[in-house]
Image (cartoon, rainbow, N blue to C red):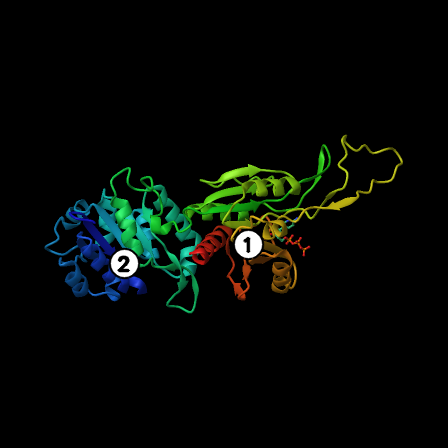
Amino acid sequence: MLTDRRILLVVSGSIAAYKVLDLARLLRKASATVHAVLTAGGARFVTREALAGITGQRVHDDLWAAEAEIGHIRLARLPDLVVVAPASADLLAKMAHGLADDLASTILLATRAPVLVAPAMNPAMWEHPATRANMAALVARGVRVVGPGLGAMAEPESGPGRLAEPPEILAAVEAALAPPGESPHAPGATLSPAGRPLAGRHALVTSGPTHEPIDPVRYIANRSSGKQGHAIAGALAALGARVTLVSGPVAVPDPPGVTVVRVETAREMLAACEAALPADIAVMAAAVADWRVAREAAQKLKKQPGAAAPSLEMALNPDILATLSRHAQRPGLVVGFAAETERVVQHATEKRLRKGCDWIVANDVSGGVMGGERNAVHIVTAEGVEDWPELPKAAVAERLALRIAQTLA
Ligand code: CTP
């Protein structure tokens, strides 16, 4: 219950604003007092009369209204929690940069109350580096976030950007207002329980290359940077999963909130993965070397004057993805990657069946994907193929984590 709790509900412009009437109704039903502030964009989708009717309070929308006077300061001091729902890309950008050119943004700059935002926008806008940076800045300042979810949007497009459902936002409000010690999350935590759909799940992720030694100073490797796998581990952790990241040698930093197990060779990677079981989710993003040198030299190989170059005899490495897919403790959802340079989807479809995993995330590595910042992937499942647009690797990771959460829900 939210008895005696004062919520300031800021409604900005989004097609999803109609849902805010239901949210206001739920907040009132939970005995909260709700004051609403409408931005000019918000007023295009929901009327002040409808909001006033449900909240039982006058709706505020004008920074310069005669009766407002120092109204924005009063409104900023009044609430126990400010809830921005829907939070448009524009309003989030204003919040991140401290702009104050209308009533809503001025209150958000002036308030000392905790703030919860429920973003809603087109997936391309949500995934844009500018919005990513704005969200990172807001989260670093302790702003709480609920959603957005995945799903069909107003446009013929799907992806993350759908406003969280009103009961989910209500749960996030209750979590934000829970007395210290009762809240499952530390102050400034980014997600409400409803926004942590993978809470209680264990995810195993592999990332980076493997190094296969030739002798004590030389090895065989590949160009994998670990950026994509590490981003996936971080994105799963952000949705509440306990994550074990088994990583080959990489230069990228450890993602926050993740247990990292460092390995060098494919055989060590397999052993670390098996030791981490049981898991609910396995995402095998590592570029595991398919072969190793059959006999690693105990001493550095020396060139002999006049002698021919040595030839290396290779041995097959274990296939970690295929092993886990057929394991007695097989994780419920096994996701593999396919790095292809031609007929990407066809090869990935065959690979999914051959390896026995549930999904293959297929990418074309003929360009600068390995070590690069962006990735265009196809998700191959038993149901068919989803073609995702080219995105920053962090956005691919977030979308994949949401897709996994949606599937396990
Ligand atoms: N993989 C693995 N163990 C291996 C090789 C690959 O777990 N020894 C996993 C990778 O982590 C990835 C998937 O298998 O999830 C696909 O790897 P990829 O190298 O693209 O395919 P290959 O199995 O090597 O097939 P191909 O020779 O067709 O490239």
Residue situated furthest left in the rendering: 67
The answer to whether mark 1 and mark 2 are in CB contact below 8 A is: no
- Residue drawn at (24%, 61%) of the image: 22
Going from the N terminus, do you reach mark 1 or mark 2 first?
2
| Residue 382 in picture, x, y percent from top left | 55, 64
Residue 300 higher or lower than 391, as above or below: above
Quick one: label 2, few (<14), some, or many (20+) residues within 10 Å? many
| Residue 252 in picture, x, y percent from top left | 54, 41
For the residues marked 1 and 2, what is the alpha-carbon distance in whole angstroms? Answer: 38 Å
Task: Evaluate whether residue 212 shows in this view.
Answer: yes
Mark 1 Cβ inside 8 Å of ligand 1: yes
- Residue drawn at (34%, 46%) of the image: 138
Lateral position of residue 57 relative to residue 132, left or right: left
| Residue 340 in picture, x, y percent from top left | 64, 57
Q: Which mark is residue 335?
A: 1
Task: Evaluate whether residue 99 shows in this view.
Answer: no
For the residue pair 379 and 38, the one nearer the viewer reads as 379
Q: Which mark is residue 15?
A: none
Q: Residue beneath label 2, please?
A: 12
